[in-house]
Structure formats: C-alpha cells, structure tokens
Amino acid sequence: MRRFALFFAALLLASSAFAVEPGEALKDPALEARARDISTGLRCLVCQNQSIDDSQAALAKDLRLLVRERLTAGDSDEQVRSYLVARYGDFILLKPPVKTDTIVLWTAPFGVLALGALGMALAARRRRGLVEAAPEGLSDVEKAKLAEALNEGNQ
Amino acid sequence: MIVETGHYALVLALALALVQSSLPLWGALRGDAPLMAIAPPTAVMQFLMIALSFGALTYAHVVSDFSVANVVENSHSLKPMIYKISGVWGNHEGSMLLWVLILGLFGALVALFSRGMPDDLRAAVLAAQAWMGSAFILFILLTSNPFARVFPAPIEGNDLNPILQDPGLAIHPPMLYIGYVGFSIVFSFAAGALVIGRVDAAWARWARPWTLLAWTFLTLGIAMGSYWAYYTLGWGGFWFWDPVENASLMPWLAGTALLHSIVVMEKRDALKIWTIFLAILAFSLSLLGTFLVRSGVLTSVHAFASDPRRGVFILAILVFFIGGALGLFAWRSSALKPGGLFAPISREGALVANNLLLTTACATVFVGTLYPLALEALTGEKISVGAPFFNVTFGPIVAPVFLLMPIGQMLAWKRGDLVGALQRLVFAGVLALVVALVFAAWRGEPVVSIVGTGAATWLIVGSFVEIAGRVRGRGAPLGTAFARAIGLPRSAWGAAFAHAGLGVTLLGLAATGWGVEKITTLKAGDSVDLGPYQVVVRALETRPGENFKASVAPSAILSGGVEVARIEPSRRYYPSREMTTTEAGIATLGLGQVYVSLSGENDDGSVDARMYWKPLVSLIWLGALIMGLGGALSLSDRRMRIGVAKRARAKAPSAMQAAE
C-alpha cells in the first residue's frame, strides 16, 4: 500500500506538465496531425494502458518529442514506429503486432464467435430434429399414461 | 472500544456465516425443515454484524481516530467530512469490508423477501451465499484487518489519495459494488439450484429480479466511474480499456447476456443449461475482477493495494468458487432436460444471437485483459493491449448487436416472422437513414460517426416501435392508446427504455468524432475559439481550499459575444501528500460540453491548457441513466414483485407442460 502510494506520488510529481503541451506542437499542421496519430497508438511505458498522447508522465513527453523529431527528419509513420519498437520492444505498441506470440490473442475473439455460431447451428439442427421427430398425436405409451392418470383422477 | 467491537462483530459474522453455510445445506439435502429454517435468521444476523463492523470503521474515520492504522494511512483531520466517510472504502481493507457488507446484504434481502420460494431452494441459496461470506470475511480477518491499532498513535494521518477526494468517489464504489457483488446472489441461486436439482422456469422467475437489480446498479456504477475519470483525470477521455475498467465491463457483458437468457428460461423453459452457466460466469468474472484489482497483479489508477499474501489468498478463493461451481455445473447439468422448442427465427433465436455476441464480446475483453499477463508469465515477453486492439475486435463484434436489437424485439416467441418484423421497422430504418444523411451534410467526416448516428437512431426509434404497435394497434384513438400505454406491463417499458438508452449512449459516442480540441497556452484576458463558442480567461489566480491550494483560471464562455456559462478549471496542490490533481472546468451547453483542463504553469505566469468542445457528449452518460431507468421500471413490474412467486408456483407445472 505505502509502496504504491509512493510510486503514485512519484508518478504525479514527475509530471506536473501533462499530455501534449502547447510548446511541443510542430509548425506544419500535416506533420503535427501525423505525430498525434502515431502518438495515440504508442503506450506510455510507465503508465497503465495510456497512450503517450494522453499521458502526463515525463517519459511520455520525451517520446512525443522523439516522434516529432523523427517525423521532422523525414521518417515515414512506419519508420517512426519501427524505430521505437527497436528501442523499446512491442510493449510500446498499444495494438500488438500479429506474430507467433500474439496469434492466440488475435484469433481468439473471432474464433470464439465462430465456435459459438457453430454450436448454435448444431443446437438449432438438433431442435429441428426434435420438432420433426415429435409425433403429431400421443404415442401408445403416452395414451396409456393418460388413461391411467384420468382413472386416478376419477377415483 | 468501538473499534474493537467492530472487529469482534466481524468475527461473530464469520461464525454466523459458517453456521449458515453448513446446517441449512444439510437440512436442504436431508429435507429437514428445522435445519433449513436456520438460514434466514442467520443471514439477517450475519448482515447486521457486518453492518455493525462497517459502522465501527466508519466511526473511527469520522472522528479521525489515529490509533487505528487504517485511519492513519487514509485520513487526515482536516479532510472534509464527506471524504472522511468515503475514505472508509477508498482503501484496500475498507473496500473489502464494503464487499462483504454487500455480500451479506444480498443474503439478508433474499432471506427477507423471498418467502414464496421453496424452503429447500432458499436454504441452499443462502448456504451458498454464506460460503462466499465465510471465505471473504476470513480473508479480511487474516490478511486485511481494517481494525489494527498503531502504538503510539501519530498526531496526524497521511490523508486520502487526493485523486480519490471527489464526490464521484463517494458514490461510485458503493454503486459499482452493489452491481458487482450483487451477481453473487445469482451465482448462489445457480449453485443452490444445482445442488438440490431444481432448475426450471420457476427458478428463473425467482432469480430474475436479483439479476435485474445487480445489472441496474452495475450499469449506473460503471457510468459513474467513467464520468469520474472523465472529469478528474483531466485528459477528456472516459474509457481507456484499463484492466480495472475491463474488470467491471466483463461481468456487465455476461450479466446482460444472463438478463436476456433468463427471460427465455422463465417464459419458455428453454436455454436452461446456458442460463445457469451465465449465472455462474457473471459472478466468476466479478471474482476475477476483484482478484485483478485487489491482488496487485495490475498497477493502475484504481489499484491501491499490493501484497502478495493477499493475492494468493484471493486466488485460492477464486479457484475454489469458480472451480467448484463449474464442477457442480458439469456434474449436474447433464441431468437437465432441454425445454421449449423454437425455430431459429424467433424471439428465442434472437436472444440466442444476443447471447452469442455478448459472450464473444466478453471473451474478447477477457483475452485482451489477461493475455499480456499470461504471456509475460510464460515467456517473459511484454506486450500492450490497448484501445486500438479493442477498436478492431470488440467494435465489429458489438456492432451487429445494435443492428439486431430492434429486430429481435419484434419477433414472436417460438416462430417469428422476419419479413413482417422488418416491415414494421421500415419507419425506424428510414428515420435512421435521414438522420445519418443530415449529420453527413451538416458535420461531415468521420464516416464512423455518421454511421454511428444512424445506428443510434435505429436503436432509439426501433426500441419503441413494438410498444407503439401494441398501443396504437390499427389507429386506435389517442385516449385508448394512452390507456393502453398505461396498462402495458412495466417490464415492456423497461426493455424499451433500456434499449433506447444504449442508443442514446451510442449517439454520444458517435458524436465524439466531431469534437474540437485546442492545446494552447493561456494568459489572463486570452480568448480562444472553441467550436461554436469562445472561451475568455478572466484571470489566473491562487485560492486556498480546505486541505489544498488551488491555481484557478476563472473563465467565461461566450456564444456570439453573449456570456452563456462560467467555468473554473483548476489545479489543486495537496501539501499532506505533496500531490497535484487537475479539476477540469466543464460547462454543459445543450447536450454538449466545453471542457477545459489546466496543466503546468510556465515561468512567465501563463498556464498550459487542453480545451475541448465535445458535442452531444453528455448523452454517453445520459444514455446509461436511461438504461438504469429501464432496469428500475422492469424491476417495479408487479410480476417481479415478491409474493407473486407463490401463485406462479401453483401455476408453473401446467405452464411447463404446455411448453413442452
């Protein structure tokens, strides 16, 4: 508890400045728009699922400046991203790349949907089978049971 | 002394919970009425003991008793009274006590208000609830004692984390917990029914009001939390797929699926196995959420606890209850006979599709939240799963739900008429198209927003088409229509409002695409254009607060040169913890909001600020309120009320035969 409170305090203290600051913006609006777009997909490494565009942490500010520096130097969006991945690993991407490690992650949602739909279809077929198999009237056994029940009722 | 009484009351509650978890269960299995009759009074007494314990802790916080460790760590004598009270659950120990308080509350409510239930089922349900009560009270007593004393007592406390000193926090956790933990009683209903082998339409009728109650509070609790994040965290976002948010979203999705499948079970005696499974799933996900938040596995704004002992203890509770329930389910569910039959195109069919999509959405959130943890544990590889991932997976899975909702409402039970349903929805479809086109012409890009407004209109209008049909029939006069509208069951209105509420939320979400953002430096006297408004900064000043110092930028919002609102965005500095928080200045104008949030001060006396015009943004939360209203309306339906269950039981056998 106390350890976390300290960590939290440190996080906030280190960050009296926050999110994208006015001084950081690039002069060229097109380039700045690209920088914002890239920033929203990059994780502030010391925060919980927050993009560097939103984060108040000092590290996020450094990364925002770094992104803008690379863009000004003429990098493409993709080059900026791979530059950062080379330095910080996939951890920095809020949308994990599709590769062996993440294949389960990416296929799970639609896999569950497909399996569920298959199960639904099978259940529907079974129900249809039951509907068709169900005889129109009563079976002999049921007739006997009915007669018995009626008799009991009469007694 | 009061503090020790509270501690002792909690021990007594544990003893009562142990009695409640064993004797009535034995009675239910043996058919022993006196043993079963033990359950209700112990459930009520157990709740009263926990309430006494909770009251004692609250007392210690209110009078700032700094000889109690929990008060020292989380309170301060200068803290305003409301935060002294809300500080009780603003920390690990206190929030766990609130957890068991609500667990006990639901047990007591069932004991008091389910007199119509068969004694064996009620005894089994209350016993199951007490098993969880015992486990969590034991957890508190052994690892998270809120009543521990410190000696010598310090003069002053460490204060509550300033970010938590907010009216939103006074309301958000209790509401969220009533929803979150409320699903425990549904879980107990499922476990109890499996143990004594009574899983039928009547069970669904008894369990349904509790599901609805928990769902309504969870909906409001999540919305409240999201609004709290929106105005206190200061970056204008309201949902960022934080694992702790996901932890509350998962039970909500499973609970929503349950809410729908339990209707099928009640009305048609079908989907029994599936409903029981969802009842177990919804609370299992609540338990998982508790584990994620309380164990310190994650570190985020919400997680203010970290102690591995606690983590392992909760994990053991989690494994025991989820494993136990699923084991019971696997063992007993094969004995369940399939109930009412239905064609794929029918109300049941539509609800099955709803369940498929909602559980898939839930699975997506589950995988997205836990995958990074699992991968790191297994391979040491660290990855992040954030909003961009959920946008491309969760989004497409949920989108069809919006499309199908009005159609499902129009289909008849057993065998529906799709063409007929679509014909009756033509009006809603045309209106949706018109609205989308109007927004396209008026606001333009992005396309997602345009489609979103169309879908929202379809949902809102479509939700009421069924009711309109029932009320107006073939052109009934207004007087008759009004009388019919009053006469409709409240649950029909409830469903319509809940569905429309989701549409309203969707409209608010869609409109975020048309927001205006300015990131700029402000000085006194500056004027900034923001969408249709102008923000004029009157001054930059420093003001003292009760336990903080604030730098404030009082500003006026002008529309065409006329002042329409005033805001006071500020940054607060709390000396007791040397922390700074941002308080956004928000003005609701029409349905949109002007949002100004300050960041650091510069050497020349100016301040950096993020400023937004967010059109229709208030609809996001207004929609959730309407959904909550829908839940409350349904809950007030006399068919949901207590006592009716008795009559229903008398009728149930004949109804079930007819269905088969």
Image: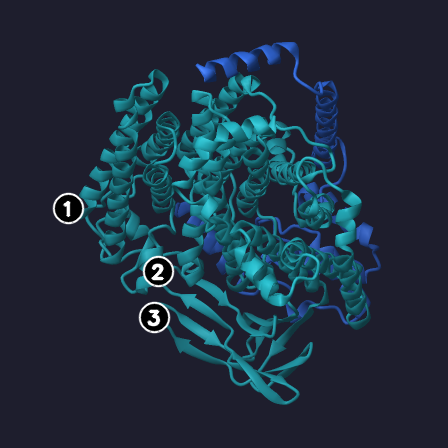
Chain colours: A blue, B cyan
Mark 2 and mark 3, same subunit? yes
Query: Residue beneath label 2, please?
Result: B83
Residue B179: image x %, image y %? Answer: 46, 46
The tally of labels here is 3
- How far apart in space, not on screen, are marks 1 and 2 (Cα)? 23 Å
Residue at 31% from the left image edge and 23% from the top image edge: B22
Residue at 78% from the left image edge and 50% from the top image edge: B422
Q: Badge 1: few (under 14), some or many (20 or more) residues near its Cα, within 10 Å?
A: few
Q: Chain of mark 2?
A: B
**Tag 1's secondary structure?**
loop
Observer-nearest residue: B360 or B404?
A: B404
Residue A51: image x %, image y %? Answer: 65, 54
N-terminal label among 1 and 2: 1
In the rendered image, the vertical position of residue A149 relative to residue B151, given as above or below: above
Disc 2 residue type (three-letter):
Tyr
N-terminal label among 1 and 3: 1
Mark 1 and mark 2, same subunit? yes
Residue B642: image x %, image y %? Answer: 39, 42
Observer-nearest residue: B297 or B360?
A: B360
- How far apart in space, not on screen, are marks 2 and 3 (Cα)? 12 Å
Disc 3 residue type (three-letter):
Glu
**Picture quarter containing residue B548?**
bottom left
Mark 1 and mark 3, same subunit? yes
